[in-house]
Image (cartoon, helix red, strand yellow):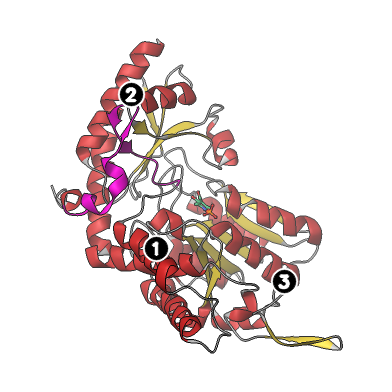
Amino acid sequence: MANTALPDRIRRDFPILEREVHGKPLVYLDNAASAQKPLAVIEGQREYLANHHANIHRGAHHLAQWATEAFEGARKKIAAHINAAHAEEIIFTSGSTDAINLVAQSWGRTHLSAGDTVLVTRMEHHANIVPWQMVCESRGAQVIPVNVLPDGVLDLEDFHAALKQYRPKMVAVVHASNTLGTINPVSELCAAAREAGAATLVDGSQALPHFGIDVQSIGSDFYVATAHKAYGPTGLGFLHGRKSMLEAMPPWRGGGEMIRSVSFQGTTYNDLPHKFEAGTPHISGGIAFGLALDWMNAIGMDVIAQHEQVLVQHAHSTLSAVDGVKIIGTAPNKVGVVSLIAEGLHSYDLGTLLDGQGIAVRTGHHCTEPLMDHFGLESGTLRMSFAAYTTTLEIDRATSALERAMRMLR
Ligand SMILES: Cc1ncc(COP(=O)(O)O)c(C=O)c1O
């Protein structure tokens, strides 16, 4: 099997993987919620805070310049990692949620009017639904969902029909679903949306940790992601926006950093990217995110992607062989996310019993309530989600633990 040696090489980078939970070795399968951090990120952030910290952009002194260069260096690393045309197209945010809210409030308030529509899909995370509902409510516009097929694949016929019928102003789609694992054909979706006259936003929260991203070949107007799912810190993410779009958009939050000059006669705004970065940013987080990208690139995104494909196939074959287990989301093109239900049992009860055996999974609706309603899954699913350090042996342990838990509850 390809690349199953990867965890042997990298697990020692993650001190947390050596710990025990309830007296059992930790099996961490909750990576779609948040991934663990390698030493390069932990130590790099510590080193910055211990020896280099100062506020950025406006200091004449050595530390301020050092911190500014490191923070702006991280912006360049993000731009290079996703093949952005310009580093100033990268706006630091507190995460994907914050980035989508920025677009919904800045772009949405200036582009949506009564009767307009925003097209999303039924597999979106709440973060790519609620900000659109909020702005649509204030503008008299409407959010329209595209269907998902029973195997978890996006219904492309419905997508194209909705483009024709509604002529949406914005198409906002998830790159990889955090509940189903489905990877959507975002280049194709963005091209069709553009042809229909819509702007596009891609939620790459679950793509960034799993495979390489090229925003120019995707052709999105906006692309968002969050650092903590990609081995980086919490409270930090980014918005990539097409330069011409960002330049034409008004600032969203006001305050320091985002201005050129302030007076009571009127205020003028800074250039990109600072126009959208009011206040002191998460400096250590930005720097640590850059280190997380370095860590992933030292392995190679293709190597990570191939390894995770082995994990998904292994998980699908072992888990679907368990009597009474049904996998929700069997798209041919998936990231390392496996949702399941066990006939007649509540996912929370199973998750609690798995925790007792040191196995960390997530249960419930995974912030995708409309998707759960669509599939009629009242008590949600039990989700196992993988990372570069996950082993097939861990999946086997989780499968045995699941079988044991099912026996106990029956
Ligand atoms: C697909 C998707 N979008 C958005 C988010 C929100 O990310 P954050 O909470 O870091 O803003 C998540 C987090 O679970 C996600 O999985």
Q: Is residue 182 above or below residue 366?
A: below
Q: SS at mark 3? A: helix
- Residue 184 in percent (x, y) is at 43, 55
Q: In which quarter of the image is residue 275?
A: bottom right
Q: Name the residue under label 2.
A: 402
At 26% from the left and 35% from the top, the residue drawn is: 395
Q: What stretch is highlighted in magenta?
A: 9-33
Q: Quadrant of residue 313?
A: top left
Foreground disc of the pair 1, 3? 1
75 inside magenta stretch: no
| In the rendered image, the vertical position of residue 170 relative to residue 61, given as above or below | above
Q: Please state which of the two labelled residues, at mark 2 or mark 1, is closer to the viewer.
A: 1
Q: What residue type is labelled 3?
A: His
| Viewer-nearest residue: 51 or 320 | 51
Task: Identify the residue position indicated by label 1 in the image.
Answer: 46
Q: Vertically, is 370 above or below 277?
A: above
What label does residue 184 carry, if any? none
Say which label, 3 or 2, has the lower sequence index: 3
Labelled pair 2, 1 in contact (Cβ < 8 Å): no
Residue at x-position 67% and y-position 57%: 132
Residue at point 74% right, 68% down? 109
Q: How far apart are marks 3 and 2 (CA)?
A: 49 Å
Q: Which amino acid does label 1 sit on?
A: Arg
Assign a secondary structure to mark 2: helix
Identify the residue under disc 3. Answer: 111
Q: Can residue 386 be spotted in the picture?
A: yes
> Of callouts 2 and 1, which one flags the residue occurring earlier in the amino acid sequence?
1
Amino acid under disc 2: Leu
Viewer-side label of 3, 2: 2
Q: Where residue 288 appears, x then y in whole percent? A: 41, 65
Q: Say which of 15 and 103 sits in front.
A: 15
